Image (cartoon, rainbow, N blue to C red):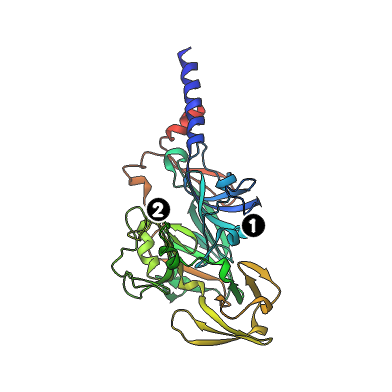
Amino acid sequence: MHTNILKAFLSLLLCTQSLLASTHCVEVMILNASIKAGEATGKGSSFTGRILFNQYLSSPKVQEPSDTRSFSGSEAWFPAGPFFLDGQVLTPEAGSHLLMKDRQAFVFNNRSKAVFRAFSLVPFPSMGEMQSLEGKTLTTRRLITNKFESAGIVYVDQAQTLNDNSEYFLDGAPSTAEEALQAGRSVRVFAPQAFMLSAFSDDALIDGMAEKAKPETKRYHPRGYLEEGSAAFLPTGGEKMADQPLFGKKTTVLVDGQYQFPAIRKQLLAQCDQAILFNISAKKVIGPEFLVVRSKIRGIEDGRVLSVSAEEISLVMEKDGREEKISLAEVDSFFLNGLPVESAEAFKAGMQLSIYQPLPQRVDVLSLPPYPDFSTSKTFGHLEQSVYAVDGTRHILKEGDLPNRVKALQQ
């Protein structure tokens, strides 16, 4: 009888924890979406995503590669939540159109409301720890959960085919496959990139520095650049913020839309230029909760349109003020506010413009491993570690204790 009472209590506790769960911080592949932008509370909005990486997701179930999570109402869309798109900050109304099938996104919700989403026009890089290289097949191992107390430590192996014209980088410098690709190192593989122009109308963008000037503003998100060789942040159109620390102990760093562990973020930040600071509630930026940065390897530059003709587009570059001309005949794809358009006909003088240079597959390697050694961790060393091989079979890397919440489910 006592056993049955205990089981009932644990079941009630788990249900209560699920209902009270208020923080979701995950990278997902969107499977379906229906967003009702314009509603004050997001009523009627929903989307479902397959979890690619779980930084924090209150859930009693064990994380597996096929796990999904559904977001609805203000969890799916909230009128105060900005969207980050490859270094631009979009309004919730404009960004809501990016929530569509087959898009990858980094989703952060707090108190059951959408806080922000980070997107890219191209797929996020395949990321993980190098395991092996056989011929042209590179295998990397990605951690897919960081919510260890509820899911354990779970990895997924990914196989990637290397192209003959791939470019290789080691710790930010050009390298070769032989020199860079060694087991245990952190690897990001970027898909080939077409020549794209992505323009933004003024009403689709948020000026973080202007938001700061509003008396009622509780959060703002200036965008700018990391100063070369220092920790200074240079906001676009704002004062230099060299005396502000870029991140504190609780700062989450997203590089090209993906979460990075503290052990390697310093090396990655040295390879980045464009950045967005984001505080959830602070009125001034002192150790932001989120640092959203874009690496130079992405091959993206920002500017402002000066003029558009049938043959070319003229613009002034944001970072150094130089003027450039681009032949429209050479461009593969055009985007307006993150959505594809047929041509540059809709581009107007004064619009913000991002230029995506045509690039081959790029393999970006750090000489450090991407994850801590959880086996020796005082906090997580006792937990079971498992990996899903490329063929989908599950293997135990280290036998250990299952998380308490998982044990409760098994009783």
**Contact, CB < 8 Å: mark 1 with mark 2?**
no
Reading the image, the residue beneath label 1 is 102
Indicate left or right for 319 with 377 as reference: right
Q: Residues within 10 Å of mark 1 (few under 14, many from 20)?
A: some
- Which numbered tag is attached to residue 281? 2
Instruction: Please identify the residue farthest to the left as the structure is shown.
Output: 243
Q: Position of residue 267 (x, y in %)?
A: 37, 66
The answer to whether residue 162 is seen in the rendering is no
Residue farthest toward the right in the current orientation of the protein: 342
- In-front residue for pair 221/269: 221
User: The residue under label 2 is which amino acid type?
Assistant: Ser
Q: Nearer the viewer, residue 379 or 237?
A: 237
10 Å crowding of disc 2: few (<14), some (14-19), many (20+) = few
From the viewer's perspective, tell me whether residue 196 is left or right of residue 145: right
In screen coordinates, is 394 left or right of 253?
A: right
The residue shown at (65%, 83%) is 328
Mark before the other along the chain sequence, 1 or 2:
1
The total number of labels drawn is 2
- Amino acid type, residue under disc 1 in the picture: Asp
The quarter holding residue 345 reads bottom right
Question: Residues under labels 1 and 2: Cα distance?
Answer: 31 Å
x and y percentages locating residue 375 in the rendered image: 36, 45
Residue name at image x 59 percent, y 71 percent? 201
Mark 1 lies on a secondary structure that is: loop
Residue 82 shows which numbered tag? none
Image coords of residue 31 (percent x, y): 64, 51
**Percent x, y of residue 259:** 45, 57
Report helix, strand or loop for mark 2: loop
